[in-house]
Amino acid sequence: MRPLFQLLRRAVKPRFQVAFVGEDFPSPLPNRTLVITVDGSLALAAGMRCPCGCGDDVLLNLLADQRPTWHLTVRNGRASLSPSVWRTSRCGAHFWLRDGRVEWTADQRNQLVKDVRAWFAR
């Protein structure tokens, strides 16, 4: 039963695209897209719609000299962020973005429900 559950989760797990823009985020942020603001070749911030489906925007600092900060890696058009993103207000989502896919942390309940909700929010 467990392998079937994991196969189902992988099938509905949405992959986030990457979009690079100038210094301002578009309004509204597009679904299933990690938007990166840049100044020349310097990545300033990342923004995305919360993958739990609550509809909130998640904005993350990418500048190393400010806290908190996240590290962005983009390979083959797929983004990864570290450390994990943990929303301490509202929905409380806690996840990693790895290779363009949301990986919910072990402390999150109803992970499959969140993945399905995000799949249909596109």
Image: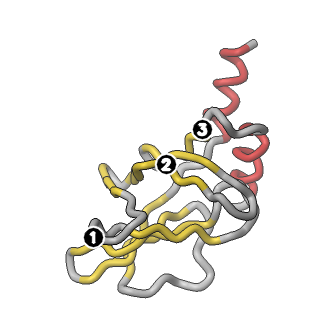
Give the CA separation, mark 1 to mark 2. 18 Å
x 71%, y 18%: residue: 4
Mark found first going from the N terminus, 3 or 1:
1
CB atoms of marks 1 and 2 within 8 Å = no
Could you say where residue 89 lies in the image, as x and y percent from the top left? Answer: 70, 63
How many residues crowd around disc 3 within 10 Å: few (fewer than 14), some, or many (20 or more)?
some
CB atoms of marks 3 and 1 within 8 Å = no
Task: Give the foreground label among 1 and 2.
Answer: 1
How many residues crowd around disc 1 within 10 Å: few (fewer than 14), some, or many (20 or more)?
few
x 41%, y 69%: residue: 61
Asked whether 46 or 32 is in front, the reply is 46
x 75%, y 12%: residue: 1
Measured along the vertical axis of the image, is residue 29 above or below residue 73? below
Badge 3 is on which residue? 105
Give the CA separation, mark 2 to mark 3. 8 Å
x 20%, y 75%: residue: 41
Q: Secondary structure at mark 3?
A: loop
Badge 1 is on which residue? 65
Q: Amino acid at mark 3?
A: Thr
Asked whether 19 or 59 is in front, the reply is 59
Task: Report the side of 88 relative to 36 (left or right).
Answer: right
